[in-house]
Image (cartoon, rainbow, N blue to C red):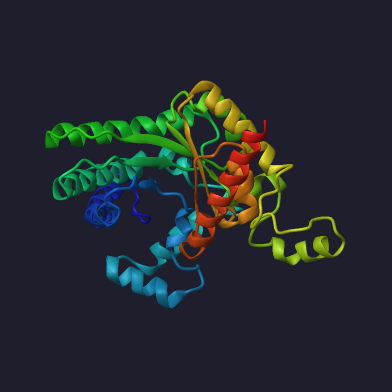
């Protein structure tokens, strides 16, 4: 798919990938029969799926598998390299350039949901999440691709399911324009790893080189990628919650990222009105305990008032 030269080639490759996506999504639904399952559409930059331009052995292996010249693989790797990939060609931007990618994924999601609904003997309710939204018009564009694919597949199968299309809030502009975005998005999920990077202006991968000096000199007291920076990143979260729910009162809002498993961060998220947190599997027990504690604390505070 990544090596395709034309839309037709890319669509053919995506069609070969679709059964694998359907299988993955189906098993996700079957393993969580009573829970909502939220699936994020393709987010990483495409170069992450290919070897480095210097890994000749892997390049030759890919070329042999695909029946193409190794130089073509190497050329394509060179074309898609980015100076700053986490701020580059990824997330919803992939859909704007290559709508067929999200079209295939949306089709796979609803095909899996229909199959799982039949096997579970009750309807599942898919949540489809578009990543890296910073502008209402780009969200509307991607949402239209998703909705057309989902509605077309349901009509074809003669099965109607309730589904929801929402977005990740990872770009500061997306947080500031949350009121507009909520006109179309049915739910938000704050991606705090990216939101922290883009708000504070430093890379998560590189911050370890200088943050220890900041801790030593008491400039920062904690790692903002582990515990949310309430005064900066947290302020954007509060703005987005307020503006989003001013537009859509029933807007479901959660958070994903490392801070979703941090007790101090969860206390903050509960205070500003988030509905859920999502975190790494090994952090789930701590997150559940912290969420319960936060809820008790804030309910007591309400009672005192």
**Which quadrant does the N terminus fall into?**
bottom left
28 or 292: nearer the viewer? 292
How far across and down, in percent of the image, does residue 115 sit? 17, 47
**Which quadrant does the C terminus fall into?**
top right
How far across and down, in percent of the image, does residue 210 sit? 77, 63
Q: Residue furthest front?
A: 304
Q: Residue at x 25, y 42 (%)?
A: 124
142 or 113: nearer the viewer? 113
How far across and down, in percent of the image, does residue 175 sit? 60, 34
Name the image quarter holding residue 99.
Answer: top left
298 relative to 18 in the view: left or right? right
93 relative to 297 in the view: left or right? left
Q: Residue at x 26, y 35 (%)?
A: 150
Q: Residue furthest right?
A: 217
174 or 50: nearer the viewer? 174
Res 173 seen here: no
152 relative to 44 in the view: left or right? left
């Amino acid at each position: 798919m990544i090596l395709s030269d034309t839309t037709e080639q890319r669509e053919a490759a995506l069609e070969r990938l679709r059964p694998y996506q359907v299988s993955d999504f189906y098993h996700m639904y079957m393993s969580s029969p009573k829970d909502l399952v939220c699936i994020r559409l393709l987010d990483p930059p495409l170069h992450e799926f290919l070897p480095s331009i210097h890994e000749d052995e892997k390049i030759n292996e890919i070329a042999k598998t695909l029946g193409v010249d190794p130089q073509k693989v190497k050329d394509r790797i060179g074309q898609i390299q980015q100076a700053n990939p986490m701020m580059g060609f990824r997330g919803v931007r992939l859909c704007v350039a290559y709508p067929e990618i999200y079209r295939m994924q949306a089709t796979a999601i609803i095909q899996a949901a229909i199959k799982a609904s039949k096997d579970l003997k009750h309807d599942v309710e898919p949540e489809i999440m578009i990543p890296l939204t910073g502008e209402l018009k780009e969200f509307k564009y991607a949402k239209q691709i998703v909705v057309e694919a989902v509605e077309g597949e349901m009509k074809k199968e003669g099965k109607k399911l309730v589904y929801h299309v929402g977005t990740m809030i990872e770009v500061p502009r997306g947080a500031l324009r949350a009121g507009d975005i909520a006109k179309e998005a049915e739910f938000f999920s704050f991606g705090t790893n990216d939101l922290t990077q883009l708000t504070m202006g430093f890379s998560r991968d590189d911050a370890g080189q200088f943050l220890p000096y900041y801790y030593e000199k008491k400039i920062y007291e904690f790692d903002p990628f582990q515990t949310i920076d309430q005064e900066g990143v947290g302020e954007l979260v509060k703005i987005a919650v307020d503006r989003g729910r001013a537009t859509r009162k029933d807007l479901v809002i959660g958070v994903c990222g490392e801070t979703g498993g941090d007790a101090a961060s969860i206390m903050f998220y509960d205070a500003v009105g988030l509905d859920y947190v999502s975190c790494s599997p090994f952090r789930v027990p701590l997150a559940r305990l912290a969420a319960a504690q936060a809820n008790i604390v804030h309910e007591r505070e309400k009672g005192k008032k």
